Image (cartoon, rainbow, N blue to C red):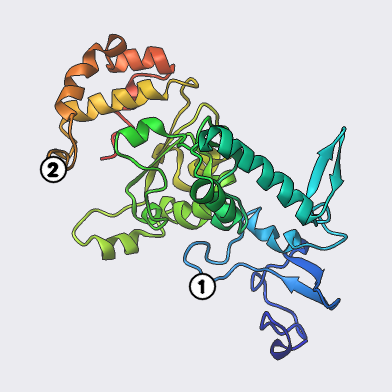
Amino acid sequence: RPASQNALGVDFTKQVPPMAITMTKAMTNTITDKSGKRWNIMVVPDKECVVNSGLSSTRGGKMASYMYAHDGIGKERLKNPRIFRGDQWLDTGWDNAMALYAGLTKKILDNDGPNALFYDCFDHGGAGGGFENTWGTGKLMFSALQTPMVRIHNRPAYNSECHATREMGVGELNNSYEDAQLADTIFCTGANPYETQSNYFLNHWVPNLSGSTVDKKKQRFPGETAAAAKVIIVDPRRTATVAICEQVAGKDNVLHLDIEPGSDTALFNTLFTYVVEQGWHDKEFIAKHTRGIERRRQDQPHEHGGWGQGHRHSRCEAAPGRVSGPTNPS
């Protein structure tokens, strides 16, 4: 069809130029609406989107295939409530399900209060799920039933997996994606972004590591030095992220600290000690917005035998010189 007769605006009556469009089977599906009418659908990434610039991740690129179709991968999706009787799950109606759920919940609330209601759930989803996946359950648990007894994923409570960094004042997910295009040094710990955040890595890290964002840095920060970024990756494994960073940025600009699992606290305490010893920390900012820095400095040398580079080496199984040399972002 000509461009005026298809949703993509592409003229398929002639050869489509290379890289002009990406189409895979996973991007398409055929669904049936309530009236019985069938629709061909296709979900494609938006080239104007500042997050992915037309790239699609392994999950996002399959969003169309997740739409319900009787013969698709969503065919196992529940169409009605189910109840477990004997040794099997059986279909049931909404009235029966709600009476059972609400009745049992009310009995527990009346007898023992909301603290006796426990939930085990997830709090986000991929490929377009996200907040919408658990908005209703969140309102039910926290607003209606008012129970605090909720755990998520692999955790004992509705809490973070990054307790130590939170205590240090570094909240997770606290940066703009664009920061990865502008940073002088990217510090990545406990993550494998090529495989787990591919659009973030390919569309924001890689341009910076290759030097493609130097002009953007000069525009944003006039008078400052601007060059391709360096990257520090803390991970016991040599992941695909490490290999690709070395290929794009060059091995001299990539530091992979393959520490022993569980020794990251020793590493961060050592880095903290070293940065303070060198006077690199922002004293004015710390004085205005934090407390306890002096006590922390006093306690640091006495904890677990001290956090000098030699001690970190014994805990992390990484060469001492790799901290004082390549890890200096300057």
Image-based side of 108 in relation to 166, left or right: right
SS category of the residue bearing label 1: loop
Query: Which is more toward the observer, 287 or 1?
Result: 287
Residue at 30% from the left image edge and 34% from the top image edge: 168
Where on the picture, by quarter, is residue 20? bottom right
In the depicted structure, whether residue 200 falls above or below residue 313: below
Image-based side of 275 in relation to 110, left or right: left
Residue at 55% from the left image edge and 55% from the top image edge: 135
SS category of the residue bearing label 2: helix
Query: Which is more toward the observer, 62 or 10?
Result: 62
Q: Which residue is mark 1?
A: 48
In percent of width and height, residue 249 lies at 45, 46
Q: Which residue is mark 2?
A: 288
In percent of width and height, residue 173 lies at 42, 47
Where on the picture, by quarter, is residue 4? bottom right
In the depicted structure, whether residue 326 falls above or below residue 90: above
Crowding around mark 2 (Cα neighbors within 10 Å: few <14, some 14 to 19, many 20+) is: few
Where on the picture, by quarter, is residue 211? bottom left
The Cα atoms of the two marked residues, 1 and 2, are separated by: 40 Å
Q: Amino acid at mark 2?
A: Lys
Image-based side of 2 in relation to 233, left or right: right
In the depicted structure, whether residue 73 falls above or below residue 272: below
Say the numbered circle drawn on residue 22: none
Dot placed on the residue nearer the N-terminal end, 1 or 2: 1
* Quadrant location, the N terminus: bottom right
Image-based side of 62 in relation to 144, left or right: right
Q: Amino acid at mark 1?
A: Glu
In the depicted structure, whether residue 122 falls above or below residue 180: above
Residue farthest to the front, as pictured: 110
In percent of width and height, residue 266 lies at 36, 20
